Image: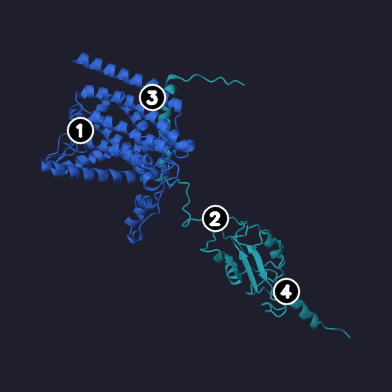
Amino acid sequence: MNWNFIIFSIVKIAIVVGVVQGMVAYAVLAERKISAWIQDRVGPNRTAPPFMKYIPVVGPALIRLGIFQPLADGLKFMLKEDFTPAGVRKIYFWLAPAIAVIPSMLVVAVIPFGSQIGAQKMVIADLNVGILYTFGIVSLGVYGIVLAGYAANSKYPMFGGIRSSAQMISYEISMGMSVIPVLLIAGNLNLSRIIGWQSAHGWMVFYAPLSFIIFLIASFAETNRLPFDLPEAETELVGGYHTEYGSMKFALFFLAEYSNMIASSGMMVTLFFGGWTLPFWGLDHAATSLGMGLVQILVFLVKMLLFMALFIWVRWMFPRFRYDQLMDLGWRRFVPLALVNILVTAVILWMKS
Amino acid sequence: MIVNRKPLTFWERLYLPAIAGGLKVTLRHAYRTLFQGKKVTMEYPEQKWAVPTDYRGAPYLVKDQEGNTKCVSCQLCEFVCPPKAIRITPPGPAGQIADRPNAEKMPEEFEINFLRCIYCGLCQEVCPEEAIFLLKDYSLTGQSRDEMIYDKEKLLALGGTHGGIQKWKHKLEEAKEQENFPVKV
């Protein structure tokens, strides 16, 4: 047993999980703030601990930004009565939120969020089959939602669950196929090596733009975000698959949705936008000093947050797709497009070699 | 009627220009809200609406310019009040006399239940003494039902003074002049 490895892994897991949870909390705030700005509103700007307003300048500014809103939200979720409706299938009802959260947390494990600090690689698990692992785990995400829909024993959550099962499985295919050109070009499944290839040759998005577009749209569908939020279409299905849930169990679904967003943003940054690298200031190779290591983590986070902002921005712009349009887009547009993309990439690579 | 719709062009079917257009619209709105201060929200407790002059707010009792209670306890407002929010206790034969000289009486107790009041303004219209007015108060709060029943002192304090013709004062002066009228013999 390598104790060094175990200890550092535990530390990394703790930090990454903590950061992801914090980012989820603030992603909810960002969602509310950005939606407010887009809709000419102000957004949450009241919540604050009582002493904050006595701190000059900084305090009121933070309050106006709503920085303390997630704390209040989290506290509310935790203190609420954990109510289980009478008609539900209890075991599945209790299991579903956990099953929804776990895969979304596991995906983050293979994403390299920095080069290295000291001798430690800034990735929890540097798997050689990183992408395959990701897709394997992502497909598990649907179970939580389907189970929630089934367990609620009520028709609207059931609809939500059914919709999500069809949607997520359909879009997984085009998502998986959209990544194949990337793998063909980079010649590797390991995410760290793909980043290495990108730092040598330039960002993947310039080599496989079509892959990026398909991946982007498919990840909107995979994370159940608008314009593909059919599983939780509030206007049609009351609340979707989590209608019957309350308090912390509901919060776990929220957590799952937002950590999926974080994970897919991370995947997009890693696959198409060079991960933690920047082509200048010597940030394109593994860090040798502590400062550089931290800067590279920061670069990764900033890129990821830009994608998060895109996710949120898009949500407040488009109307929801109709179910048949969604399926049409997934099966009759993206699957053939992704296949052609693979073929063209393969032919070009073959011609070059 | 059959509307002939044009078949979508290639770019329209691709939706990408429409998506870009949507992004532009939302971005423009976010920019205006953030940097040009064109938000539509009014942040209520700090900012308040300019209340229109004919606004019908909470009905309060008013005093005349000499600080006397104008209400003469005629109970017309109590009678006309549709939700029966007003309750007046008249002084009775042995009760307190009015502040104002020559006015017959004033209410011993005058209560308005603001949980019942519908702000219709009938009390103001019916009042022969111009003693009750719907002022501009629109934000009435209380922590219990009892707190929302305003008594005479509170209503008078909130209503303030409202000058007028001072009918009873003129009556008094007229009566005094009658007494001093030089009678020719």
Q: Do labels 1 and 4 share a chain?
A: no
Q: What residue type is labelled 3?
A: Gly
Mark 4 Cα shell of 10 Å, populated few (<14), some (14-19), many (≥20): some
Q: Which amino acid does label 4 sit on?
A: Trp
Q: Which chain carries label 1?
A: A
Find the distance from the CA under tag 1 to the CA under tag 3.
Answer: 34 Å
Can I make out residue A224 in this image?
no
Q: Mark 1 points at which residue?
A: A279
Q: What element carries label 4?
A: helix
x and y percentages locating residue B127 in the rendered image: 70, 65
Q: Name the residue under label 2.
A: B50
A213 w.r.t. A38: above or below = above
Residue B168 numbered tag: 4
Q: In this view, does B11 lie to the left or right of B75?
A: left
Q: Which chain carries label 3?
A: A
A279 w.r.t. A20: above or below = above
Q: The cyan chain is which one?
A: B
Find the distance from the CA under tag 2 to the CA under tag 4.
Answer: 36 Å
Q: Which chain carries label 2?
A: B
Q: The blue chain is which one?
A: A
Find the distance from the CA under tag 3 to the CA under tag 2.
Answer: 53 Å
x and y percentages locating residue A338 in the rendered image: 32, 21
Q: Mark 3 points at which residue?
A: A330
